[in-house]
Image: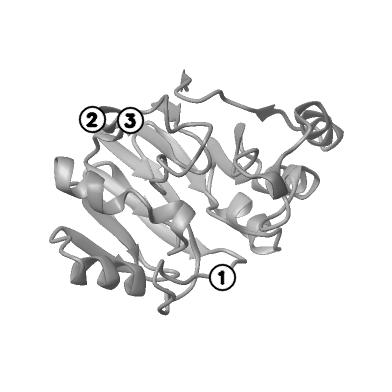
Amino acid sequence: MTIQYLGHSCVLVEVNNCKILFDPFVWGNPLAADKVSMQDLRCDYMLVSHGHQDHVAEVMSVYQYCEAELVGVFEVSRWFAQKGVKRVTSMNIGGSAQFDFGKLTLVPAAHSSSMPDGSYGGVAAGFILQTPEGTLYFAGDTGLFFDMQYFGERYDIDVAFLPIGGHYTMDAADAAIAARWLKAKYSIGMHYDTFEPIRIDKQQARAAFEAEGQQLYLLSIKEKVSF
């Protein structure tokens, strides 16, 4: 399993001979816009956690580039289908489906959702991927909530992607509690430093995780790690 961080909450995961792109947002991110190319976004699947602009901005351009299949909550998938995305799988909270990479389950996230034009975006979601190479939890945008304890009890989570920027999501202190509840072997921070309200002190963020007996991985733009 190889993971490449592309800034904000945009992550490319290569697993079981599939490329999975989460929450494609690059050109509006001042930290990533001059570092990430369209070729870097080539994928087989796009998994979109909710409809906010900073999580869907590149969906159309990625689809036009490589015809990746879009997977998300019903309202998000339907909105993009109406925009011309033909390869769409609509799901909802609690639902599971089998894909080439493994089993995907949509789980709740404590956040709002609307589409870039202001239309209804359903509910925000997280993703749990059970693959032959390990289990991943992508939290999307969320606050801390007790279901995370259940996720940690039900699933043997290898890698957790957690927002840590605060303001719109949980901060590092709450994310550290989430990491402990999830019992993830590796916790990777996301949704931080992109804009002023979510800038963090990285040393303090790591210390918050250490206080919970966890380790926080903060990847630079385009950095790759393998687990």
Cβ–Cβ under 8 Å for marks 3 and 2: no
The image position of residue 101, as x and y in percent, is: 27, 41
Looking at the picture, does residue 71 appear above or below residue 111? Answer: above
Mark 1 is on which residue type?
A: Ser
Q: How many numbered circles does the render carry?
A: 3
Mark 3 is on which residue type?
A: Glu
Report which residue position mark 1 lands on.
112
Taking depth in this image into account, of 166 and 44 the one nearest to the observer is: 166
Q: Locate residue 127: give its quadrant.
A: bottom left
Q: Secondary structure at mark 1?
A: loop
The image position of residue 112, as x and y in percent, is: 56, 70
Q: Locate residue 71: give its quadrant.
A: bottom left
Judged by depth in the image, the label closer to the viewer, 2 or 1, is 1
- The quadrant of the picture occupied by the N terminus is top left
> Residue at the location (53% across, 36% down)?
159
Q: Locate residue 219: give its quadrant.
A: top right
Label 3 crowd bin: few (<14), some (14–19), many (20+), radius 10 Å: some
In this image, 212 relative to 9: left or right?
A: right
In this image, 21 relative to 161: left or right?
A: left
**Numbered mark located on residue 174 in the image:** none
The image position of residue 77, as x and y in percent, is: 29, 67
Report which residue position mark 2 lands on.
17
Mark 2 is on which residue type?
A: Asn
Taking depth in this image into account, of 195 and 123 the one nearest to the observer is: 195
Q: Secondary structure at mark 3?
A: strand
Report which residue position mark 3 lands on.
14
Judge whether residue 157 can be spotted in this image.
yes
Separation of disc 2 and disc 1 at Cα?
33 Å
